[in-house]
Structure formats: structure tokens, C-alpha cells
């Protein structure tokens, strides 16, 4: 028993430490470095001690300016009245959804929407167009609003025009469900997938993320969760504005609590 | 629930506390406790599909009990029935959808069965069930086993999700032994857990990110990047699965059950036969004992041996997945094994020296890397793009900027490659040292490893590659 207790202590103490450290506002800085924290439920950029620094490095002004610019651009096309009802939202797409959904879940909770998130890693418009996955989730969730984030894995394909059919097929599967398409926050210039998507779906359905300056994670491609949260803030602001074809209620959440909804993580095909 | 999540370890610590308390009580009570925990663990991974496991256990154990009393042909027919019954759920969940797709294409119809999620671990416990029945049939295993023990054997949670596939004769005697766990075995378990976490959560998960980009669109990268991505995957799959195996074996050791290793430095192999003696040992020996030997093994001449090898490896490939790529991967290994077998008399005459050993290791490694390209790629087009990148767009001037842009990635890859060349006795020496280090040192090492995992952690926990098989 004594040996087991010693072993349990070895396993338990580090776990207790990382969890305590994750929730604690204290930051332990070894010389020239800073100990990372394990992902903890209280993560919101608004009340996180790290949030301020990240906001600064992300140049949030840029994102807000760009959002405002998009809103004013599309306002010229005509105004829509905001829809204040609670929605069943299906949010699907590639790995970028993983970053966005955390903040989006907070928006959903605040505004009474119900989320179903589907993250299909390494997926493309072509994959979503050629499989039954989207119909499956539409049948399952019966969404009243759809959010799409796709294109990350097609930014550097040789001939983006080839994907036109795929994008149209994805939209065809949605039928007349209102939707928004969140463009890729490109980390370097793409070969045209963003522009092609914008042209097909139209400015009132398309949130152009290319102008955003986001702090990237260690892979230098995906935004950090904090940056993704601020990105989502920009998207939400636009989704509520009359610049979109179907504005919905997207009041900014004030508490920093994490809210979880059903999330499906699909692995890359045949890996 | 994955072994590298905080949730798992929190649950495991609670489980371990009560396990330690119950250890000195009745053996049946302890077995029941582990079974309940295992089924709970399985439920978290598969929800209600976990009921398949006790259902399989009930039918398979009952039929095997009947079979053990039978003689002659009826015994053989009963074994066929048991194996068929064990395989049915696996075949249904794994192959019904692709088979219906294929049939639909052949008949030019639009009929297709829905795609069903494969219950995690089904392949592994099915193989354990089959091996138990076959061993009883062959009278290789003669112990009388109770249903509770059998359910423990099939559901033991460290082995449930992705093996190692454990034989009846390894596990049952240990279940029956009086549960006296030495301090040495406990810390050996802890050592293996730490080693597994380093391999899986620190190195494999980190290098996986880059490999995934390469295999998702090889055309977008230079030949150098494609080659590095392919080598990266070669190390990733080894570290991922051997890391998982180490954690499994480590947890089993903590619970007092000693299992044999599943990987023995496979990339040091000097030929492809040796590679399969060192890679995923529990699976390769399973295929050897229950597919290759029944097919004739090496008893009927070289031609029959080669055919048996190719069929066995194709079966192993198809077991990994129902796509053409896994079939090609299996066939390539089968052909490699057959060629090695055919040329063995000639190869035996070559003297061992540093040059011949190095050349044979390099050739074997290159062949294995080549085969991994098929294993990992989505389709033949991806393989073609990958190799056309490697052979037509190779430019070594990418090396310096690549290293500058992905320093940590390169360091982890190089370290993992160099670890292949470290002598086994050095590993054993470190292991022995760790076991006898003071408690506080072990605690600090574990804490450091956990913190490094958090530091290098970039996205959500990566699933173990072998969970999907």
C-alpha cells in the first residue's frame, strides 16, 4: 500500500500543480521564458491576464477597421433587418473552426443560440462537396443558420478555379438555410481560393479575413486561441450588422466562462 | 478518452487509489472492480457500442467452453463458428460500407450502406478473442477459465483500445497469481509511462503537424520538404504507437501485470524479416501464428512460403483499413518479405562487417520509408505527387531556411532519429537507474515531462494513430 501511495503522489502532485497553475492568475517566469498553462475553462481574452498583451500583439485595431470597412462596403448593396430569434447553428469546416468555436460558443450561450460544431481536420471544399457528411449533419441538427470556415487547405493549390464546382455544391447542400462563410486568415498570399469564394458566395455572405493580422500559434499558420477569439469577435460584429444577408443576434458575451456545445472532430480522410 | 489527457490521469489516480485498497481483498472482487472500470473506460470511448464487448465475451467464452469438451470434426466446426462469430462485428463495422460502395460501383447502382463509425478497440479485442479460442482448440492453452476472468482478459483497459494484443497464456496466469506488486514493478511501470508520454505527447504529436500538411497537399511543397515530411511520418508513426504501447504496458505493470514489449528498435533492422520481428510484435506474431502458419508457413517449399507471406501481409494491410492504399502497403511488405526469404541462402554468405551492416540497415530503412508513403497517403495521386516532388523538385538550398523556420521540429526529428542508434543496454541502464532513484527525483521528472508536454502542445490532443484500426 505504501508503494502505491508514493506512486499516486508522484502522479497526483504534478497534475494538481498544472491544474492549480492553469486557474491561478500567477505566472511563473523562469529566466528568459514563461511557463505555459494547460488549457483551462477560464480563457476569455476579456478577463485573462494574458489577454491584454495578446490583444496588443494582434493589432486588434486592424481587425476592427477591416470589419468596419467590410460592413460599409456591403451596406451599399442594401440593408437587412436583424433577426433576433434564437438559432440552431451548425458551424462546420476545417481546423480553423477549432479556434473559432470556443468564442462562438460563448456568443451562442449569450444570445440563446444552440451550437453544433463539426471540425474536419485537413478538409477542403472538395471533400465537403463530395461526401455526405454535410447532409448528415444538416439532417441531424436541422440548423436554422450555418457558419462555414473552409479554404485553409486550398490556399496554395495550383488552380483554385477548379474548386468553383465544389463551393457551389457545398452551397447547394445548404439549400435555403441562411449562412455565412468565414474566409481564411491567410498567413501568406494565397493562389486565389479566398477571392473565388467571395465572388461565388457574395459580399453579404462572406467575411474576408485576409486583412486581419493575427498572432499565430507555433505552427505559424493557425491563430492562437486568443487571436482566434478576437477574430471571432470581428466576425460576430459583422454577422450582427446589416451588411450581412441575414443578420442574427450576436451580442458580445461579457463573462469569461467557457460554454460547451456538441462538437464533432473528424479525422483527415484515410489517414 | 486518451491516455495523454488530464481527464484520463485524474480518473486513473482515483481508480488506482481504490485498486490499492482492494488489492488485499478477494481476488474476484479486484477482478470485478477492474472490469467495471474497464467497461466504464470503454463506454467513454464508444458510448453504447461498448455493449458489443460483453456480448462478444459471453458468446465467445460459452462456445469455447463447449468446444473444449468436443473432439474430432465437431471441434473444428465449432472453432469455425466461434471465429466467424468473433469476426462478424469487426467485418460489419469495418468493411460493410466500403464493400457496399465497391459493389455499387461494379453494378452501377446508387445503393450504399451508411458509413458507420468503427468502435475503438474492436479490432484488438476481436483478435484476443480469436487467439484465445484457437489456443484452446490447439490445446496450447489448457487452463480452465471462469467467465469473469475471460471478461477481464478481453476488457482490461490498458490493452483495450489499441493493444498490445495479449495471449491467454501471458495474461491468465498473472491474473491468478497472488497480487503482490513489487516496488520495482511499480516504478518500471512509471518509467514506461513517462517514456511513452515523451514519445507520444512530446515528439510524435509535435512532428505530426508538419507531416499532415505535407500529406494533405504534397504538390504545394518543395522536394526537400516532401522528403522531410515523409521521414517525419516514419518517425511519427513509430513514436506514436510505440509510445502508446509503452504507456499501456506501463499501466499494466502498475496494476501488477507484466507484458512483453511491442517494439524493439525496428528501424535498426538489417532486413525486412527482422523489421517485422521488431515492429508491432504482438500483431506480427498474431498474424504469424493464426494466418501464416495455417496457410502452410514454410513447410511446403519456397514458392508456397512466398505466397503465404504475401497473403498474410495483404491481410495485415487490409486489417489496417479497407482502402487500396493499405492493401498496397501490405502487398509491398509481403513482396519484400518474399524476396528476402527467396534470397536468404545467398544473403547468409555475406560476411557481417560495419559496411555490410550499415548498407543493409539503410536499404531496409529506405524500403520501410517508401512503404509508409502508401500507408499514410490518401490515394495513389498523393503518392505520385509526393515522389515526383522528391525526385524532380529536390533542392537542398531549402535546408537552411527550413531549419531556421522549424528549429524545434527539426531538433525533435533529429533527436528521435539519433535515438535509434543508442545501444539497448544504455536504455536499460537508464531504466534501472530511474527505478532506484529517490521518490522526489521521480516526482520532479514526471512534473518536468508534464510541463514540457504543455509547452509543446499546440492544438487539441492528437488521437493515437492505431485507434482507428
Image (spheres, coloured by chain):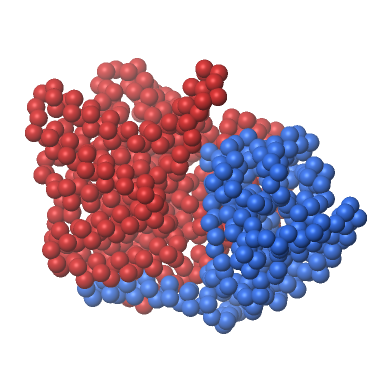
Q: Residue at x 23, y 27 (%)?
A: B80
Residue A151 appearing in the image: yes
Residue A5, how many percent across, how many down?
28, 75
**Residue B88, image quadrant:** top left
Residue A231 visible in the current orientation: no
User: Residue at the spot x=67%, y=43% of the render?
Assistant: A174
Q: Position of residue B16 (x, y in %)?
A: 29, 67
Question: What colour denotes chain A?
Answer: blue
Q: Residue furthest bottom?
A: A26
Please name whichever residue, B47 or B308, is drawn nearer the observer in this view of the structure. Answer: B47
Q: At x 43% / y 76%, what residue is drawn?
A: A16
| Residue in front for this viewpoint, A265 or A135 | A135
Residue A97 horizontal/vertical position (percent): 64, 55
| B211 displayed left or right of B392 | left
Residue under the image location 84 percent in, 64 percent down: A68
Apparent side of residue A95 relative to residue B254 in the rendered image (left or right) = right
Q: Look at chain B in the picture and name its colour.
A: red
- Left or right, A211 with respect to A76, comes to left
Would you place residue B344 above or below residue B355 in this image? above
The x and y percentages for residue B415 are 52, 56
Residue B28: quarter of image: bottom left
Q: Nearer the viewer, residue B334 or B141?
A: B141
Q: Quadrant of the N terminus of chain A?
A: bottom left
Amino acid at each position: 500500500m505504501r508503494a502505491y501511495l508514493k506512486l499516486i503522489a508522484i502522479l497526483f502532485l504534478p497534475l494538481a500543480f498544472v491544474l492549480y497553475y492553469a486557474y491561478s492568475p500567477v505566472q511563473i517566469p523562469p529566466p528568459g521564458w514563461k511557463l505555459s498553462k494547460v488549457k483551462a475553462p477560464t480563457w476569455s481574452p476579456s478577463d485573462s491576464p494574458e489577454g491584454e498583451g495578446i490583444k496588443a500583439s494582434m493589432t486588434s485595431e486592424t481587425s476592427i477597421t477591416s470589419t468596419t470597412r467590410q460592413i460599409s462596403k456591403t451596406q451599399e448593396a442594401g440593408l437587412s433587418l436583424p433577426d433576433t430569434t434564437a438559432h440552431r447553428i451548425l458551424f462546420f469546416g476545417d481546423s480553423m473552426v477549432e479556434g473559432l468555436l470556443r468564442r462562438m460558443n460563448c456568443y451562442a450561450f449569450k444570445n440563446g443560440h444552440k451550437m453544433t460544431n463539426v471540425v474536419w481536420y485537413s478538409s477542403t471544399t472538395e471533400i465537403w462537396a463530395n461526401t455526405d457528411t454535410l447532409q448528415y449533419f444538416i439532417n441531424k441538427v436541422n440548423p436554422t443558420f450555418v457558419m462555414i470556415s473552409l479554404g485553409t487547405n486550398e490556399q496554395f493549390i495550383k488552380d483554385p478555379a477548379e474548386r468553383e464546382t465544389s463551393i457551389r455544391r457545398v452551397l447547394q447542400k445548404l439549400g435555403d438555410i441562411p449562412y455565412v462563410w468565414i474566409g481564411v486568415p491567410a498567413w501568406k498570399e494565397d493562389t486565389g481560393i479566398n477571392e473565388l469564394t467571395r465572388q461565388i458566395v457574395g459580399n453579404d455572405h462572406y467575411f474576408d479575413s485576409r486583412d486581419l493580422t493575427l498572432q499565430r500559434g507555433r505552427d505559424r499558420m493557425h491563430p492562437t486561441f486568443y487571436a482566434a477569439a478576437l477574430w471571432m469577435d470581428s466576425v460576430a460584429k459583422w454577422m450582427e450588422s446589416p451588411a450581412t444577408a441575414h443578420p442574427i443576434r450576436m451580442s458580445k458575451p461579457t463573462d469569461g466562462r467557457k460554454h460547451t456545445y456538441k462538437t464533432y472532430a473528424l479525422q483527415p480522410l484515410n489517414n | 478518452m486518451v491516455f495523454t489527457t488530464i481527464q484520463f490521469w485524474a480518473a486513473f489516480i482515483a481508480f488506482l487509489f481504490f485498486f490499492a485498497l482492494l488489492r488485499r481483498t478477494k481476488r474476484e472482487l479486484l477482478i470485478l472492480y477492474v472490469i467495471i472500470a474497464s467497461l466504464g473506460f470503454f463506454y467513454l470511448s464508444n458510448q453504447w457500442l461498448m455493449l458489443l464487448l460483453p456480448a462478444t465475451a459471453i458468446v465467445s467464452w460459452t462456445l469455447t467452453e463447449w468446444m473444449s469438451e468436443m473432439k474430432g470434426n465437431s471441434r473444428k466446426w465449432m472453432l469455425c463458428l466461434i471465429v466467424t462469430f468473433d469476426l462478424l462485428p469487426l467485418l460489419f463495422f469495418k468493411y460493410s460500407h466500403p464493400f457496399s460502395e465497391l459493389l455499387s460501383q461494379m453494378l452501377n447502382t446508387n445503393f450504399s450502406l451508411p458509413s458507420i463509425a468503427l468502435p475503438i478497440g474492436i479490432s484488438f479485442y476481436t483478435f484476443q478473442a480469436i487467439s484465445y479460442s484457437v489456443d484452446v482448440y490447439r490445446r496450447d492453452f489448457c487452463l480452465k477459465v471462469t467467465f469473469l476472468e475471460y471478461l477481464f482478459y478481453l476488457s482490461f483497459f490498458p490493452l483495450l483500445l489499441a493493444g498490445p494484443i495479449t495471449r491467454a497464456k501471458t495474461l491468465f496466469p498473472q491474473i491468478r497469481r497472488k497480487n503482490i506488486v513489487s516496488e520495482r514493478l511499480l516504478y518500471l511501470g512509471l518509467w514506461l509511462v513517462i517514456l511513452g508520454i515523451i514519445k507520444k505527447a512530446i515528439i510524435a504529436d509535435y512532428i505530426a503537424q508538419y507531416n499532415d500538411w505535407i500529406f494533405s497537399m504534397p504538390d504545394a511543397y518543395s522536394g526537400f520538404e516532401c522528403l522531410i515530411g515523409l521521414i517525419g511520418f516514419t518517425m511519427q508513426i513509430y513514436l506514436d504507437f510505440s509510445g502508446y504501447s509503452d504507456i499501456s504496458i506501463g499501466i499494466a505493470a502498475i496494476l501488477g501485470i507484466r507484458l512483453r514489449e511491442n517494439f524493439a528498435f525496428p528501424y535498426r533492422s538489417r532486413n525486412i524479416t527482422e523489421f517485422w520481428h521488431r515492429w508491432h510484435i504482438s500483431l506480427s506474431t498474431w498474424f504469424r501464428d493464426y494466418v501464416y502458419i495455417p496457410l502452410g508457413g514454410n513447410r511446403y517449399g519456397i514458392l508456397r512460403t512466398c505466397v503465404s507471406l504475401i497473403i498474410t501481409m495483404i491481410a495485415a494491410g487490409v486489417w489496417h483499413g479497407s482502402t487500396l492504399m493499405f492493401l498496397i502497403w501490405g502487398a509491398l511488405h509481403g513482396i519484400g518479405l518474399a524476396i528476402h526469404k527467396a534470397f536468404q541462402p545467398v544473403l547468409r554468405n555475406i560476411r557481417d562487417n560495419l559496411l555490410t551492416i550499415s548498407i543493409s540497415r539503410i536499404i531496409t530503412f529506405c524500403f520501410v520509408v517508401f512503404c509508409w508513403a502508401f500507408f499514410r497517403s490518401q490515394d495513389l495521386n498523393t503518392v505520385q505527387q509526393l515522389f515526383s516532388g522528391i525526385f524532380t523538385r529536390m533542392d537542398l538550398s531549402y535546408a537552411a531556411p527550413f531549419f531556421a523556420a522549424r528549429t524545434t521540429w527539426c531538433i525533435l526529428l533529429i533527436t528521435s532519429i539519433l535515438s535509434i542508434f543508442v545501444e539497448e543496454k544504455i536504455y536499460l541502464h537508464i531504466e534501472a537507474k530511474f527505478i532506484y532513484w529517490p521518490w522526489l527525483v521521480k516526482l520532479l521528472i514526471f512534473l518536468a515531462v508534464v510541463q514540457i508536454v504543455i509547452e509543446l502542445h499546440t492544438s487539441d490532443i492528437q488521437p493515437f494513430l492505431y485507434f482507428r484500426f
